Amino acid sequence: MKKIVVIGAGIAGLEVSKQLLQANLPVTLIEQSSKIGGNIKNYAYLFPDFYNAEDLLNSYQYIITDPNLQLLLNAHVSKIDFSKKIYNVITKDGITIPADAIVIATGYNTFDARLKEEFGYGIYDNVITSVELEQMFKKQEIITPSGKVPERIGFIHCVGSRDAKVSNTYCSRLCCITAIKQAIETKKLLPLVEIFCFYIDLRMYGLLFEDLYLSAQRDYNIQFVRGRLSEASEMIDKKIQIKAEDTLIGRPLQMSADMIVLMVGMEASDFSKQFKYHNDLNVNEHGFFDPINPHNLRNLTAKEGVFLAGTSIGPMSVGETIDHARGTALSVLSYIKSN
């Protein structure tokens, strides 16, 4: 019986595993943390329909009991041995797992906002990230870190994306729509709060994304300011002073907010950095794994029997990640059938 190893138990790894298990193939699913779910665990609701993220994750729980699944939690892959026809995936604990095929579904990291010192994250109490705001949504309570119900919030787009100073010149694709989703969620919990979104460009590429943007303005009175934040500083009352430019009218702008939320972008996972140029597991200039081509071979590496799934190749929405993972599963099935 052919054996498949899936590295990463986020949404991509879970979806690949589900599809392969349904085809009655044994799967070893390796996850470095203590729980399955990856980054989806950080979110309360998903755009554009505010679907409950926990419900989506729970839809995969049943595969854990599948007799063909071996789930290894708290397991860190230290090496992949390609010297024999049947590969060996080796963990830091010395466990060796043989594999006829390997799927890399190691997801992404979020940008470390401390690298943008001018925004004050890690320096000023009331500067938080979009990931931290999601935790507030889970609790259904928005309180600034200094203990106040905010009356004005600024959302700062493109933190760690489209920024040559931090070596991330690419667009993370999802920050704009995430900011809009979060702004609306905030308004639902705090109807009287003022919200300002500071953006470079609004990139609403999804079918319903533009509708959500229009709804944010029309139904929730969320204000959008085209201009990059230049500086944030803390005032004596713990409010955050914002300096920016409204590039639509060509004038500088200064305002205070009770809290600012930094929309942190997606970065390549530590795993892709660890295995950079390891036996044809190439990565691109941004650190994500490089498939053979970005069109009809987006799931394949140059290494025979090694496949890619989800955001291991670049920023994707949850829906795109699941679709990509299903394509990867089909590629694995085709490979196993022909070998």
Image: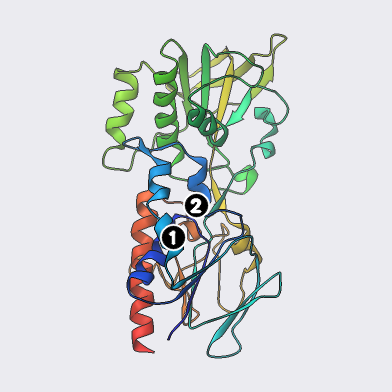
Q: Quadrant of residue 249?
A: top left
Q: Name the side, left or right, on which 167 lies relative to 326.
A: right
- Please tell me which residue is depicted at 70% across the width and 23% down the height of the picture: 124
Residue at the spot x=59%, y=84% of the render? 82
Kindly identify the amino acid type of the residue bearing the numbered disc 2. Gly
Q: Amino acid at mark 1?
A: Leu
Asked if residue 54 can be seen in this view, the reply is yes
Q: Which residue is mark 1?
A: 14
Disc 2, disc 1: CB below 8 Å? yes
> Left or right: where does residue 21 sit relative to residue 277?
left
Q: Secondary structure at mark 2?
A: loop
On the question of residue 317 being in view, the answer is no
Q: Count residues near mark 2 (Cα–Cα under 10 Å), then give few for <14, some for 14-19, many for 20+.
A: many
Q: Position of residue 334 (x, y in %)?
A: 33, 80
Secondary structure of the residue carrying numbered label 1? helix
Q: CA distance from mark 2 to mark 1?
A: 8 Å
Residue 65, position as x, y percentages in the image: 44, 63
Q: Nearer the viewer, residue 163 or 197?
A: 197
Please name the residue that numbered disc 2 is placed on. 37
Residue 51, given in percent of the width and then of the height, sits at 35, 38
Give the answer, above or below, for where 288 lies relative to 210: below
